[in-house]
Image: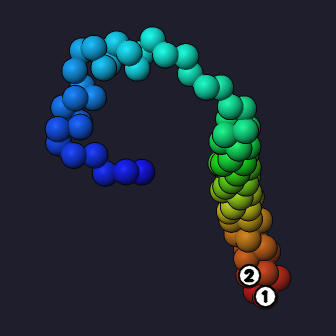
Amino acid sequence: MPNPSRSQLAADHEPEAVRKRLTTPVKASTLPDAVLGGIDGCVTTFAVVSGALCVTWLLGRWMLQTLADPVDEHLRVSIRLLQS
């Protein structure tokens, strides 16, 4: 991008120059929209899958600890009873 001078920036922000820019038709190009849409889709998919995997992993760890602790304690008590 060119580096405009201060006088060029001031001229570009005059009311007439702004009005002219706003009234000129925009050149439509679908390729940049398609590329940005594809990138957005990839990032969104990654975020959703990562979040789902993280929640699944955390739930799995919680369930393992919740279920394993009583079983572990039951086994310890049973072993102590058998040893005595």
* Residue placed furthest toward the right: 82
Total marks placed: 2
On screen, 7 above or below 83? above
On screen, 77 above or below 54? below
Q: Report whether 80 appears left or right of 25.
A: right
Q: CA distance from mark 2 to mark 1?
A: 5 Å
* SS state under label 2: helix
Q: Amino acid at mark 1?
A: Gln
Q: Report whether 68 appears left or right of 24.
A: right
Which of the pair 54/43 is nearer the observer? Answer: 43
Asked which quadrant contains residue 79, the reply is bottom right
On screen, 76 above or below 19? below
Q: Amino acid at mark 2?
A: Arg
The reply to whether residue 28 is in sight is: yes
Question: Which residue does the image show at 17% across and 38% down from the upper left?
Answer: 7
Where does label 1 land, which residue? 83
Q: Residues within 10 Å of mark 1 (few under 14, many from 20)?
A: few
Tell me the tag on residue 1. Answer: none
Q: Position of residue 35 (x, y in %)?
A: 71, 44
Asked which quadrant contains residue 36, the reply is top right
Q: Position of residue 8 (x, y in %)?
A: 23, 37
Question: Which residue does the image show at 73% across and 71% down from the upper left?
Answer: 72
Which of the pair 31/77 is nearer the observer? Answer: 31
Image quarter (top left, top right, bottom left or bottom right) of the C terminus: bottom right
Question: Which residue does the image show at 31% across and 51% down from the upper left?
Answer: 3
The reply to whether residue 63 is in sight is: no
On screen, 82 above or below 73? below
Which of the pair 73/30 is nearer the observer? Answer: 30
* SS state under label 1: helix
Tell me the tag on residue 80. Answer: 2
Check whether the beta carbons of the residues at disc 2 and disc 1 lie within 8 A of each other: yes
Q: Residues within 10 Å of mark 2 (few under 14, many from 20)?
A: few
